[in-house]
Amino acid sequence: MKPFTVVFDLDGTLVDTAPDLIRSVGRLLERKSLPAVPDSELRPLISYGSRVMLKHAYSLLGVSVPPEKFEAWWREYLDIYANNISVESRPFDGLVPVLDRLAARGVNIAVCTNKTEQLSRRLLSDLALLHRFEALAGRDTFSFCKPDPRHLTETIARAGGDQTRALMVGDSDVDIDTAKAARIPVVGVTFGYCHAPVQSFAPDAVISHYDDFDAAFHKLCPGA
């Protein structure tokens, strides 16, 4: 029997990346002589990716950016972010002990994120977390990404697991929809970047701190 696998989303689930993501948007806008936008407008969109954040920022400012210019500005944003990816980003409180306990149980741990694989690896390496994961799949690892369920199932396969013995942990409707489509139980975390209460998307369990993870894990994965 293959080992059990727990797959985590990254932004808003494993790591509080909002400070560096949002600050990088501000730096780009400053370079373009545009005013800042409130953090509260960008934070709920983090799970949808940097393109969505930027488009929303331009919309709030009433700025029309032609497609070619948008692509150039988006790549400039990525450069800014890559150089400031771990200034303030930190693992959520209680995460590291959870990873320790899962590893001690022989559970394989993986990451399935819509952040690019290169940036994901850089961030987790900077935070001394990368070595803890059997597999990491970003939005560009395959030709598909969340909410396509294959992003999750292929991540599990890369981690040496089986989707019938797996659990997803995420902070947004994208994560929950992906897990449901793959018929994999999912834990929603309330401390992430969802645009609506994560409970409203009906995950199989909800936690508000990683201290609550073990109870949810044992409830959803009694044979793990």
Image: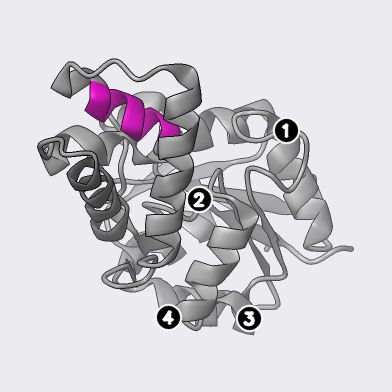
User: Which quadrant is the N terminus positioned in?
Assistant: bottom right
Tag nearer the camera, 1 or 2: 1
The answer for how far apart the CA atoms under marks 3 and 1 are is 25 Å
Which residue is disc 4 drawn over? 97
Tag nearer the camera, 4 or 3: 3
Task: Tell me, for residue 169, which label it has, or none.
Answer: 2
Give the mark, 3 or 1, whose residue is nearer the N terminus: 3
SS class, disc 1:
loop
Give the mark, 2 or 4, whose residue is nearer the N terminus: 4
Give the residue type at disc 4. Pro
The answer for how far apart the CA atoms under marks 4 and 3 are is 15 Å
Q: Which residue is drawn at 63% across and 81% down?
A: 131
The answer for how far apart the CA atoms under marks 1 and 2 are is 19 Å
The answer for how far apart the CA atoms under marks 2 and 4 are is 16 Å
Tag nearer the camera, 3 or 2: 3
Give the mark, 1 or 2, whose residue is nearer the N terminus: 1
- Give the side of residue 25 with respect to residue 131, left or right: left
User: Does residue 197 appear in this view?
Assistant: yes
Give the mark, 3 or 2, whose residue is nearer the N terminus: 3
Give the mark, 4 or 3, whose residue is nearer the N terminus: 4
Task: Tell me, for residue 36, which label it has, or none.
Answer: none
